[in-house]
Amino acid sequence: MQLILVTGAQKSGKSRYAEQRALALAAQPGYLATARVWDEDFAERIRRHQAERDARWVNLEQDVDLAAHGFGGEVLVLDCITLWLTNLFTDSQYEREDTLATAKQRWQAFIEVSPPTVIAVGNELGWSLHAETQMGRHFVDLHGSFMQHIAAQATEVVLMVAGLPLTVKAPAA
């Protein structure tokens, strides 16, 4: 299996890059969205992102159980790890260690049923303001630990900076 992790700051071009890579690898890739609708602004953002993906895409949504995607194609974009972890963290009543254990278990189940190539998108947190609340700090800790877990498994890691992809971990020759 090829696991490509695309990470970077918000609005750094992660999703666009992941989509371009997927379309270069498959005629009809899957797009697994993890967002939950929190308010009307977020609902509009989701609608806009859905409208940007044309008929070449198989659009899927799973806010918690990633392994239930049911996609049988060759390439799957998972967007976004950060939103998925937010969902798990919220569902656990903000329990950091339980969420990390659950995330690792669910991630492994997802990998086991996924296509040969997965392009996973997630934010790099902690490059901005320090979280003011204990809950925010716990989420940053959880997120960082989980992203390190995924990066260790990944065959390739790409860091997006201002729309430019920087290869942090290259596939083995």
Image (tube, rainbow, N blue to C red):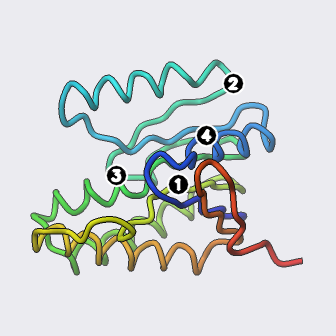
Residue at 70% from the left image edge and 55% from the top image edge: 117
How busy is the neighbourhood of tag 4: few (under 14 within 10 Å), some, or many (20 plus)? Answer: few
Dot 4 and dot 2 residues touching (CB under 8 Å)? no
What type is the residue that disc 3 sits on? Leu
Camera-near label (4 vs 1) is 4
* Percent x, y of residue 111: 55, 63
Q: CA distance from mark 4 to mark 3?
A: 17 Å
Would you place residue 51 above or below residue 21 in this image? Answer: above
| Mark drawn on residue 56 | 2
Toward the viewer: 165 or 36? 165
Q: CA distance from mark 1 to mark 2?
A: 19 Å
Camera-near label (1 vs 2) is 1
| N-term-proximal mark, 1 vs 2 | 2
Q: Report which residue position mark 4 lands on.
A: 16
Q: Secondary structure at mark 2?
A: loop
Camera-near label (4 vs 2) is 4
Would you place residue 98 above or below residue 25 in this image? Answer: below
Q: Secondary structure at mark 4?
A: helix
Would you place residue 43 above or below residue 99 in this image? Answer: above
Q: Report which residue position mark 3 lands on.
A: 83
Q: Report which residue position mark 1 lands on.
A: 121
Q: Quadrant of residue 96?
A: bottom left
